[in-house]
Amino acid sequence: PELIALAREPTTTFLPLFGLEEPDVTRFIDQTTGVAPPASLVSAVFEETEGNPLFVGELVRLLAQEGELTSVVPGTRLAIPASVREVIGRRLAHLSVRSKDALTLASVLGQEFEIEALSRLAEQSARELVDVVDEAILARALTQIPGTPGRLRFAHALIRDSLYDSIPAGIRRRLHRSAGEVLDSLYRIEREAHLAELANHFFLAIPEADAENAVEYARRAGHVAVARLAFEEAARLFDMALEALKLTRQPDDALRCELLLGKGDAHARAGDTLAAKDSFFAAADLARLLDNPEQLSRAAIGYGGRIVWLRAGRDRRFIPL
């Protein structure tokens, strides 16, 4: 009531408060811990907290206590400190049971989601979810995405992560399978743009869902990512396909070789020469076992690299390959 009354005053001005930027996070870690943070740490903290000063402070404090300030590798998902969970829990405690249940389901869909997808996953009509969604928006747990009607995002990644982590592992796998099936149906016409999203759901659903689905979607998503020049993302997707392939009922070495070639190509285009050579060399070994000269020659050419005057140097695998 006091804020509403204040807002009616003609001289009142509200200034939006934004989160810290990555350079600010770097300075914060340096000044509060005395440690010059590596780029991998700054990136992980910024991505996990979205620059929220309270969350940055609590997360950095936890990492310092555990002696992990300099051991964070790229791509690491950081644990949510208990103090941050408590703050998030207090915000979510004001929600009704229906609203919190819907948000928990939405957390499986990801940081952003469409109301129609949530409606199908929850087996409720979009109209039934309107009150639930409005309640979550008023509680600042969800925000609307400007210019995209029917699409919402969690107000903060840690709100989504906290809800997602509260789901037991077995139920989570079943929900990912259901989410994959829902999105597969929803995106039937424009599936190519959502292949990575589908691959992720079916991969996280294993063994509740057939691993073959994860392999196929991740493989196709990898090629789409290469075409869009997203080479690091492509390498990640080919790696996901390779991991899923290990869990299929019938191993397919020819497909594994093809995925290794795709992964090597993605790494090479991204400029990660060492990772590219490892993938191409593994593909070459497999192609020899399969007696597949076409795949072997592609592996050799990939290993040799795009620089035609490159010399073997100390690389003992170069000339024999």
Image (spheres, rainbow, N blue to C red):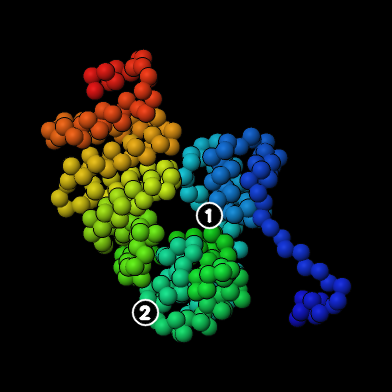
The kind of secondary structure element at disc 2 is loop
Of all residues, the one furthest to the front in this rendering is 308
Across and down, in percent, residue 26 comes to 65, 41
Of all residues, the one furthest to the right in this rendering is 11
**Label 2, label 1: how far apart the Cα atoms are:** 30 Å
At 48% across and 39% down in the image, what residue appears?
A: 73
At 59% across and 49% down in the image, what residue appears?
A: 46
At 46% across and 85% down in the image, what residue appears?
A: 128
Image quadrant holding the N terminus, namely bottom right
Of all residues, the one furthest to the left in this rendering is 291
Across and down, in percent, residue 302 comes to 31, 31
Q: Which one is closest to the eye, mark 2 or mark 1?
A: 2
* Residue 286, above or below 203: above
Residue on which the image places disc 1: 80
Along the line of sight, the residue nearer the viewer: 11 or 141 = 11
Displayed quadrant of residue 15: bottom right
Across and down, in percent, residue 252 comes to 17, 46
Tag 2: residue type?
Glu
Position of residue 11 in the picture relative to residue 252 (left or right):
right
Along the line of sight, the residue nearer the viewer: 159 or 283 = 283
Q: Classify mark 2: residues with Cα within 10 Å, few (<14), some (14-19) or many (20+).
A: few
* Residue 268, above or below 140: above
Along the line of sight, the residue nearer the viewer: 201 or 192 = 192
Image quadrant holding the C terminus, namely top left
Position of residue 107 in the picture relative to residue 155 (left or right):
left
- Residue 3's label in the rendered image is none
Residue on which the image places disc 2: 123
Of all residues, the one furthest to the bottom in this rendering is 127
